[in-house]
Amino acid sequence: MLLVFLLWGAGLGAAAQFGKISVIFEDLRGLYGGAGEVGLGLIVSVVGIVGLIFGTTAGLLVARIGPKRAIVAAMALGATVSLLEATLPSYPLLIAARVLEGVSHLTIVVVGPTMIAGLATDRMRPFAMTLWSSFFGVTYAGLALIAPILLGWGGIPALFYAHSGWMAVMGALLLLSLPADSARQTGPIGNLWREHVAIYASPRLAAPAMGFCFYTFLYVAVLTLLPPQTPLAERALIATGMPMVSILVSLTLGVRLLGRMSAVRLVQWGYVAAIPGFVILGLFWGQGWGMVLGGFWLSAALGVVQGASFAAIPELNPTAETRARAAGAVAQLGNVGTTTGTPILAALLVWGGPITLIACGVAFCAAGIAVHALQARRRQTRST
C-alpha cells in the first residue's frame, strides 16, 4: 500500500497545479490584470484544456512508453515549471509554463489510477481507487489551510517553491520505489483519430469516462454556484463542508458499498441518490439550512459516484494497456465536464432561475444512469 499512497501523493501535486492558482487568483489580478478577465481565467483553465484535447492521446502514449517513466518525467516537469512560475514571469511566458504544466498534470492523472489498479490487491482495490479519486478534494482542503501560511511567509513565490519541492520529492520517491517498466512497445501508434474512435466505441474503455463526465459537469458547478446563493451566515459552512462530506462519504460508505456491488452499479445508485439533493435545493433555495442540507446531500451522493467511477476502470479493463486508455478517456471527458458545467449552469441560473438549474441537474443524473445502462447492455451483447 505504500506505493499506492506515493502515487496518491503525486495526485495531490497534480491537483495543486490547479489549486495553487485558485487560492491566489485575486492576487494575480494585480500582476496580470492587463490580460483581461478572459486572460486571467485562462491562467487557471489552460491546464484543463490540455487534458480536454489530448486526454486519450496521453493514454495511448503512456501505454507505450511505460507508466513509471511517464510519471517520473511528469513530476520532474511539474517541479521545473513551478520554479519558473515562482519568478512571476511575463503573461505570455506564464501561459506557456501552464501549458507545460497541463502536460505534466495530464500524464499524472492518466498514470496514477492505472498503476494503482495494478499494484493494489483485489481486496484493497476498491479503497485504493476511491483514495485516488479524492486527490482533488483533499488538495483543495489542504491548500485552504496551508496556502495562507506560505503566502504570509514569502508571498506568491513561496507557494510555487513549496509546490515545486513537493513534486520533486514525490518524483524522486516514485523513481526509487516503483517497479521497472516492462519493455517498451515499438512501432508507430497509428492513426490517432482511429484510435480515439476505437476507445469511445468500446463499452469497456469508454464507460467509466462517459459516466464520470456527468459527475464533473455537476460537481464542480455545484461547488462553485451554491455558496454565493446561500445566506451569509451559512456560506462558509457550505463552501468548506461540501468537499469534506464528499471525501468522507466516498472513503467510508463508498468503499463499503464497492465490496457489495459492482462499481458500475454503484455509479448508477450514486446518481439516483443525488436526485433528492437537487429536489431539496429546489424546495429550499436561498434558505440557509435548506441549502446546506441539499448541498451536503449532493456532495455525499456525488462523492460515491466519484470513487466508483475510478473503481470501474480496473473492473472493466483487466490489462495495464486498456486501463491506461480508459484513464485517458476519463481525463478527457472529465475535463469536458469541468470546463462546461459551471458556465452552462450559471447561464441557466441567470436565464431561468433555480428551477431551471435543478431540472438540468436531475436530467444529468438521469443521463449518467442511462449511459451506464446502455454500455452494460452493449457489453452483455458482445459477450453472448
Image (spheres, rainbow, N blue to C red):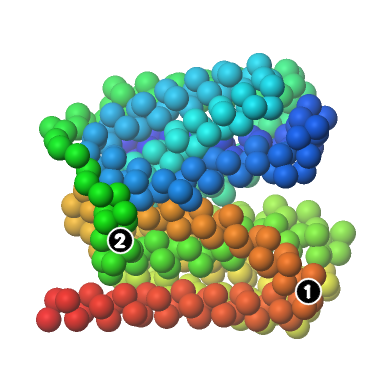
Q: Residue at x 36, y 50 (%)?
A: 56
Front-lying residue, 170 or 22: 22
Q: Position of residue 207 (x, y in %)?
A: 34, 67
Residue 113 can be seen, yes or no: no
Residue corresponding to mark 2:
197
- The answer to whether residue 319 is above or below residue 166 is below
Occupied quadrant, residue 2: top left
Question: In this picture, is 2 found above or below 166?
Answer: below
- Estimate how packed mark 2 is, as few (under 14), some (14 to 19) or many (20 or more) residues with alpha carbons within 10 Å: few
Quarter-of-image position of residue 139: top right
Q: Is residue 61 left or right of residue 298?
A: left
Residue at image position (35%, 59%) is: 311
Report how many numbered discs are placed on residues in the image. 2
Q: Which residue is mark 1?
A: 351
Locate the N terminus and report the quarter of the image it occupies: top left
Q: Position of residue 360 (x, y in %)?
A: 63, 77
Image position of 208 (left or right of 100): left
Q: Give the residue type that dot 1 points to.
A: Trp
Query: What amino acid is labelled 2 in the image?
Result: Val
Residue 35: give x, y in percent of width and height.
Answer: 76, 35
Label 2 residue SS = helix
Give the percent coordinates (x, y) of residue 18. Answer: 59, 40
Of residue 28 and residue 233, the one placed in the foreground of this image is 28
Quarter residue 269 falls in? bottom left
Left or right of residue 129: residue 81: right
Element assignment for label 1: helix
